[in-house]
Image: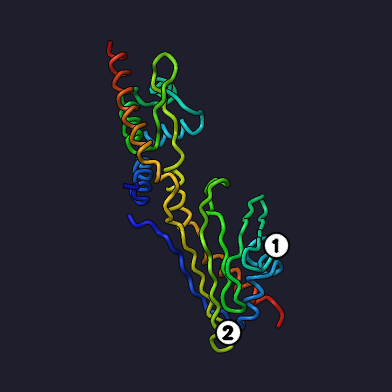
Amino acid sequence: MVFPDRVERTVQIAHPPAKVWAALTTAEGLAAWFGQEAGIDLRPGGSAWMKWDGGHTADMRVERVEEPKVFGFTWHIFGLPDDDPRRTYVEFTLEPVGAGTRLRVVETGFAQLPEEAYHTAYDGNTEGWAKELGELVDYLDAA
Amino acid sequence: MPPDIEAIAEQVFAALADPSRRAILAELAAAGPATATDLAGRLPITRQAIAKHLTLLAEAGLVTAEPGERRRVRYRLRSAPMRVAQQFLAALARDWDGSLGALQDHLDSQAG
């Protein structure tokens, strides 16, 4: 099995970078195609959010703002509990091509090592104990 | 040595591939910690088969054994490996194609 860490897409858009930039980095733009409601404080460290019908929300943290070329943010990994600290990093890169834009989006961090990985010693002990106790129960059941 | 994230995800998916183990995990998730005997009473699986599956699930770190009443071992679902599997699924479920399509439609629909 290969654990995918990175998701990457490139699309050609028939509109200039300035217009694409506005769609990616303004509340009005984000609410028009990404979320259904959105807000953004466009500066590194600023927060942004999106909401969808049905109550799902995304909280983002703006990381890179290099108008009109690079826009990056981190957000929570979709599907993980809200208290999970792991986040993926999303970076949009805009490159002018003729009258249009080549837009690349790269999302990384899906395969980051979970915090749990550092508790192997503890887990090993638990498993050893579980096995012994299981043997005891089997013995008692058989008696 | 830290466990390999791929190995953890693989164990979760291997566990979930078996319908009996899926039923055991679903029951532990839905109703909380239970003994092999509890599970045998609630699921159409023999106690012997349940005990065998629980041993395998405990070795994979998907359930953890703890002392229960009357010296019975009680099994509790461990969420950490499930979260690793969710990470894997999150990458597969990330629909950038759909979102980028919506972005293009939005830009095309704008005047000027």
Q: Amino acid at mark 2?
A: Gly
Q: Dot 1: within a 10 Å radius of its alpha carbon, few (fewer than 14), some, or many (20 or more) residues? A: many
Q: Position of residue B57 (x, y in %)?
A: 35, 35
Residue A58 picture quarter: bottom right
Task: Specify the quadrant that holds the N terminus of chain A.
Answer: bottom left
Q: In 3D space, how far apart are the residues under numbered discs 2 and 1 (Cα atoms)?
A: 26 Å
Q: For the residues carrying marks 2 and 1, which lies nearer the camera in this image?
A: 1
Q: Position of residue B36 (x, y in %)?
A: 38, 23
Residue B79 falls left or right of residue B98: left
Give the answer, above or below, for where B37 lies relative to A48: above
| Chain designation of label 2 | A
Q: Residue at x 70, y 60 (%)?
A: A37
Q: Residue at x 33, y 36 (%)?
A: A124
Q: Residue at x 34, y 50 (%)?
A: B4
| Chain designation of label 1 | A
Q: Position of residue B108 (x, y in %)?
A: 64, 77
Q: Which residue is mark 2?
A: A100
Q: Residue at x 51, y 32 (%)?
A: B30
Residue lying farthest top? A143
Task: Specify the quadrant that holds the C terminus of chain A.
Answer: top left
Q: Amino acid at mark 1?
A: Gly
Q: Position of residue B16 (x, y in %)?
A: 38, 41
Residue B105 picture quarter: bottom right
SS label for mark 2: strand
Q: Earlier in the sequence, mark 2 or mark 1?
A: 1
Q: Which residue is mark 1?
A: A39
Badge 2 vs badge 1, beta-carbon distance below 8 Å: no
